[in-house]
Structure formats: C-alpha cells, structure tokens
Amino acid sequence: MNSVPRLSTPLAERLVRYAELIPCTNAFIDARSPGSDQKENFTIIGPGVAENPRQHVHIREPHGFNIGAARQPPGCTNSLHSHDSAEVFIIHTGTWRFFWGEHGDAGEVVLYPGDTISIPIHVFRGFENVGEDVGFMFAVLGGDDPGRVHWAPHVIEKARDHGLVLLESGRLVDTTLGESIPVDEAAVRPSRADEIAYIRVPTAAEMFANVARRTSLVTDHTSPLIAEGVDDAAVILADAHGTAPISSAHGFTVRRLTIKAGARSAAYSVNVSEVLLVHRGRLDWHAKTAVALGMGNEACVALAAGDTFSAPANTARWLEASDDAEVFIVRPQAAVVATASLA
C-alpha cells in the first residue's frame, strides 16, 4: 500500500507501516467457522481482546485505549459478539455491513471508506465485508484493558464443531493443531438466556446516531491545528458538541484532519501520546523539540495510507502533506491540545 522509507531512529518503535502489519488468522473462536475463516486480525496498540496468546502486539505502551484492525475478503464475516468497553471502527478500505442482535437480525447499517461507527457496550454486533475487494478497517477500544469478548451462544456452539474451544481463562484452544483442553481448566459454554439478559438491542435510530459519515464532518474552527489548506473536524467527543456527530464518553476522542498537498498544519503540542491513522495520501510528521527523543533538535516521520504512528507527548509538532492527505487522530479523553511555538 505504501513504499515510504523505514525509520532507523527511536521513533521507529512508535511507527507501524501497513505493509509490516503482522496478522493473526486464528485470533478468535470463530476463526474456523465457515464464512469467518478468511479474516485477519491485528493488534496494533495495547493488548487488545485477541484470544490467541500468539497474537502479535506491535506497540505495547499504554495509551488509555487500544487500536486493532481487521482485514477481510469479500463475503467474510466477523461473528456476533459484545464488549464491555466502547468499540469504534474507522473504515479504511472496502464496504462494510454492520449488524446487531443475538442472531444479527435486529438491524444493519453499511459504511464506506472514511466513515466511522461507534457500537455501544453490551450489544451483540457483527460485521461483513460486502464490497468487491479486500477491506481493511481500524478498531479502537476504550481503556488500557478492554476486557474480554462475550460471544453470542450460537457462535460458541458453531466454533466447537470446527475445532476451536475458548477456556474460562480467556485462552483459545485449537484442536486442529493438536491442542487439548487442560484437565484443570474449564471451557466456556454457550450463555443461557438469563445470563445474557443484560445485552441490549439498540433501535435503528440509536445505532444510526452512532455513525459519522466522512462527507458530513464539520470544520472545528477552534482547533489549534487549523491553517490554510488544513481542516480539522471532530468525529467523537466526550460530550454534546455542535461539530461532533458522535458525542458520548468513550475514554478517547477521534478527529479527522485533511491537509491539501503542500499545506502544513499550525504547530501544536499535546500533553499525552496521540495516534495518527493515515486514511489516504502522504504526509510528514515533524517535531521541533526532539532532543528528548535522542534525535537532535528536529525529527521527521514520513507517513502513507494505512500507517499507524504513536506521536510522543510534549513535543511541538506539525503535519505537512506532500499529497492531499486525510488522517484520523485518536487521543485520550483528557488530552490537552495547545498552540506551540517553534522558536
């Protein structure tokens, strides 16, 4: 997807190129079930919720949220499950259908590249690539420990028929690889109706209110990043705000920055690490006060579509695009963003 150069600096540990993502093809209990057996899951930042202990984690530093990703060919489905923390999907490529309810028949919504959806906690949700090409999307989960996945009962039953068993400890046993259930551990059984009574079934209106379309984002003129050729729009904020289509507490915020070719953002600083998810184009992340990073007094990181970069805290930085670029920025909810001086 990109051919930007490899870094040989301390910042390299904070950068994950799309081409260097390490997938897991059996991260979850449904990985052998027909229709779900071709998906790839990625854990980019934080431990995530993968059930396979061999899932590779690219960046382990706690950020206050986790970032993962899913890549699926056309027709591939991720089975119905729920989370105890907010789950946000940002569509990078492909056309994706999200559906909900214990059997996936309570409603659905289709998203396209650049769209975002936030699915509430304690809701059985699934998703399918309904496009004609391989699709890829980022996933953001709230908290440093996002907890475990709770599968719809029929998912566990189906998985057992295809060799995968989930233990109460959260570890996945793959009997197709010769693994067996330890004698001192119990397997997760399908939940009874009374045990999933807490699971909610949102109305279509409620779910649609948690969708932010790329084409409907509104410029936030109060943003310290705004400059000529640079637009900053809120996607998710913690409370009601006129420019954020999704306004509720997630533990993190999401913004969408667009930069025209040759333009650069105003210099700014953030008191915590922020994560850049490059949706399209090419841009450079510059830091003026990079002495603390062991790189002299300036640093530059070239980014391209599909890349993930965890920008360190407390550095004066700016973004400059070589092509028209679009990047989603994820920050902890308590992040403080301010104008910075480059003097």
Image (tube, helix red, strand yellow):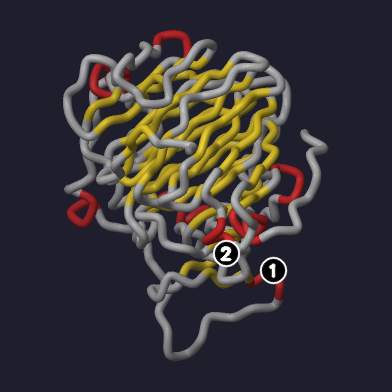
The N terminus lies in which quarter of the figure?
top right
As measured in the structure, the alpha-carbon distance from the residue carrying label 2 to the one carrying label 1 is 8 Å
Instruction: Kindly state the secondary structure of the residue where label 1 is placed.
Output: helix
Q: Can you tell which mark lies on residue 164? A: 2
Q: Position of residue 284 (x, y in %)?
A: 65, 34
Question: Of 250 and 295, which appears nearest the observer?
Answer: 295
Instruction: Kindly state the secondary structure of the residue where label 2 is placed.
Output: strand
- Point out the residue furthest to the bottom here: 184
Sequence-wise, which precedes: disc 2 or disc 1? 2
Amino acid type at image mark 2: Leu
Q: Position of residue 341 (x, y in %)?
A: 42, 36
* Residue 24 appears in the rendering: no
Taking the spot 56% from the left edge, 58% from the top edge, the residue there is 291
Residue 151 shown left or right of residue 250 in the figure: right
Query: Quadrant of residue 49 in the image?
Result: bottom left
Vertical placement of residue 14 versus 209, above or below: below
Question: Of 123 and 62, which appears nearest the observer?
Answer: 62
Q: Can you tell which mark lies on residue 176? A: 1
Vertical placement of residue 45 versus 214, above or below: below
Vertical placement of residue 172 versus 109, above or below: below
Q: Position of residue 87 (x, y in %)?
A: 37, 42
Q: Are marks 2 and 1 in contact (CB under 8 Å)?
A: yes
> Counting other residues with Cα less than 10 Å from the Cα at mark 2, is it few (<14), some (14-19), or many (20 or more)?
many
Amino acid type at image mark 1: Thr
Question: Of 136 and 194, which appears nearest the observer?
Answer: 136
- Point out the residue furthest to the front here: 343
Question: Of 270 and 185, which appears nearest the observer?
Answer: 270
Taking the spot 35% from the left edge, 54% from the top edge, the residue there is 64
Taking the spot 40% from the left edge, 41% from the top edge, the residue there is 269
